[in-house]
Image (cartoon, rainbow, N blue to C red):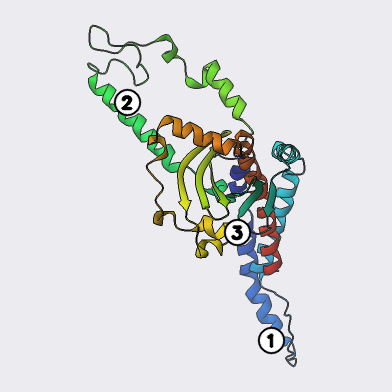
Amino acid sequence: MFSLRAFARAAPRTTTRIASYSTRTTLRPAVQTAFRSRAPQLPRCFTTSLPRFDDASQELAAKLNQEIQLESEENSTPADSDSNIDTFKSQNQHWDIIDEPGVQEVQLKRTYDDEQITVSFSIVDFNTPMMENEEADEAMMDEEESEIMDHQSGGANTKGSVNQGRTSGGNIKVAPEDSVAPADREELRNDEEDQEGQPAFPANVNVLVQRKAKGALRINLIADNGVFTIQSVSHLPDSAASNSKTPSELLREDPETLYTGPPFQQLDEEVQSLMEQYLDVRGINTALALFVPEYIDVKEQREYLGWLARVKEFVE
């Protein structure tokens, strides 16, 4: 699930560019030939800045400028994400946000007792569709439906007629709620309405907790719908090599070289719960899990506008 901005950006906004370009290209050679045959030869002058006359560059610059104007107009009204970010900042002033323009990664830093905590996430997740999971879910549903159909006698029931047990004839009974389309069910419709307009996409978050002379803990999490799910926990031993590295360098180290323990979900439930509490008291909580996708949404749009402007300036 993605922000509406991603879909709007992908939609074509003009259909006349190719036709107009081909028309100008057809007429240009005859005009240029006639002009060159009569124009006097002028001495060549060298300059450090040559004007660009090719239509491709000018048309690309014009199109990029049009995109900048469209994006600016569409985002002229502050979105909910902006107000949510401002609210988080005002209520969590212990976090320092390091956001460098043109860089995909964002970091939050704070001090907790004798610990230095760094939270890192990237806007890459905004443009990375979760198609693999969605396709896997669809394939699993298709397989389950196929198995159900194989057990039905003569295929008397449809795929959607699966619920409470079988009839005496071997078919599966149809519950009343199965005859209602999912989109028409009030409880499902209300859930969809609640999620509209919200950046509902999972975001990878890495946390580094450093203590002097004790090394660091590196925790990988997924922030999704206001919930952090711990994926793995690694301990980075204290050493001269690790002490000379920045938090960014420690977070980028290859996790495959470090033992992360068994899959976190296989740990004792009390260990899982206490680890979640450990992170919660350090500010790795619901408020932050909601903030990360919101900030990714806003930063991605800001970086996109900056990218359009830089490319436009280059090709002009």
> Amino acid under label 3?
Ile
Q: Earlier in the sequence, mark 2 or mark 1?
A: 1
86 or 35, which lies in front?
Answer: 86
Q: Nearer the viewer, mark 2 or mark 3?
A: 2
Q: In the picture provided, is 49 more to the left or to the right than 20?
A: right
Separation (CA) of disc 2 from disc 3 = 46 Å
Give residue 37's mark: 1
Separation (CA) of disc 2 from disc 1 = 75 Å
Residue at 47% x, 19% y is 181
Q: In the picture provided, is 106 more to the left or to the right than 275?
A: right
* Image quadrant in which the N terminus is located: top right
Q: Nearer the viewer, mark 2 or mark 1?
A: 2
Give residue 18's mark: 3
Check disc 2: other Cα within 10 Å, few if <14, some if 14-19, many if 20+: some
> Amino acid under label 1?
Ser
Q: Quadrant of residue 289?
A: top right
* Residue 92 in sight here: yes
